[in-house]
Amino acid sequence: MSFLFGSNAEIDIALDGQASRKQAEIKTEDGKKEKLYLYYDGESVTGKVNITLKGKKMEHQGIKIEFIGQIELYYDRGNHHEFTSLVKELARPGELTQSTTYDFDFVQVEKPYESYTGANVRLRYFLRVTIAKRLTDVTREMDIIVHTLSQYPEMNNSIKMEVGIEDCLHIEFEYNKSKYHLKDVIVGKIYFLLVRIKIKHMELAIIKRETTGSGPNTFNENETIAKYEIMDGAPVRGESIPIRLFLAGYDLTPTMRDINKKFSVRYYLNLVLVDEEERRYFKQQEITLWRKPDKGKKSTGFVYHGPLQSGPQPPET
């Protein structure tokens, strides 16, 4: 990655081992996908900064490289909230008379949160090289992507709930567990104990709720990630409907709770019944999503955040 400023020099940031380093995709602000080099919490970030002179010499007021983790709230773009900021001085003020390469190493860097681009917020990690000049500093940035790995304890309780309308409808639904890794399968059943209204169809949706801000400045953005039709037609009393929903095909992230007190990302299973008069009946349950380590990759640990809470009812989508 290079940047040409004036006709003086060209900057290139090269990561150690980047030819063999795994890449991962992340959404950009305009909804497209880009591939970046993938790192994990506690992993060192090392490499070289190459400065190639295009003229005979270049004066500068110092050269440095930073490793930064920051959160950008789209409604408050003037303020970037940095939660990680490390600096390495590459050169003191002086004059470059030939092309130069500087090594850098940020050893066992703490990267506590997963990279994320959402509707109202972005969490990013990047390297920034700055050549201080008398008039205007020249900078070059290179983004990386960070995945957080979790290892859940053995306890992963199933979800059992009842929903009903007095003397009209009584159903029970059960999901095999409450915590799922991103390539897991949601398995469950729905039991009809009482059916006195004409149900036309039933669907299960995965709802992603992104929450930013706090207090009166809280913004909630709901997105339907997936819809799965469970049943088409009228059920009868005593009928049981199986559920099997594969998560691997959907664009999901781990659950994020109160990240740096700036935002949260939560996921809900939303059961929707529609009767013949197009009335809709909802029942919602929060689930926890987590990223499972690849084979041979150790988890960085998981902090349990307490019992799950049912969220507010999502809007119809």
Image (cartoon, rainbow, N blue to C red):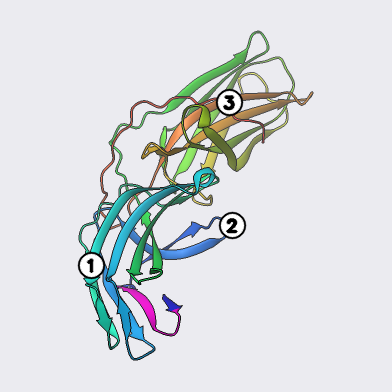
N-term mark: 2 or 3: 2
Q: Which of the two discs, 2 and 1, sits closer to the camera?
A: 1
Residue at 36% in and 40% down: 260
Q: Is residue 233 left or right of residue 292?
A: right
Q: Is residue 106 left or right of residue 243?
A: left
Please tell me how crowded label 1 is: few (under 14), some (14-19), or many (20+) other residues with Cα within 10 Å.
some
The C terminus lies in quadrant: top right
Q: Is residue 46 left or right of residue 242?
A: left
Name of the residue lying farthest toward the right: 277
Asked if the stretch drawn in magenta spans residue 6, the answer is yes
Name the spot of residue 253 as percent of width and height, x first.
45, 47
Q: Which of the two discs, 2 and 3, sits closer to the camera?
A: 2
Q: Can residue 16 be seen in this view?
A: no
Label 1 is placed on what type of residue? Glu
Q: What element carries label 3?
A: loop
> Which contiguous range is marked in magenta?
5-16
* Depicted 90 relative to depicted 230: above or below: below
Residue at 67% in and 21% down: 236
Q: Mark 3 points at which residue?
A: 313
Q: Mark 2 points at which residue?
A: 30
N-term mark: 2 or 1: 2
Please tell me how crowded label 2 is: few (under 14), some (14-19), or many (20+) other residues with Cα within 10 Å.
few
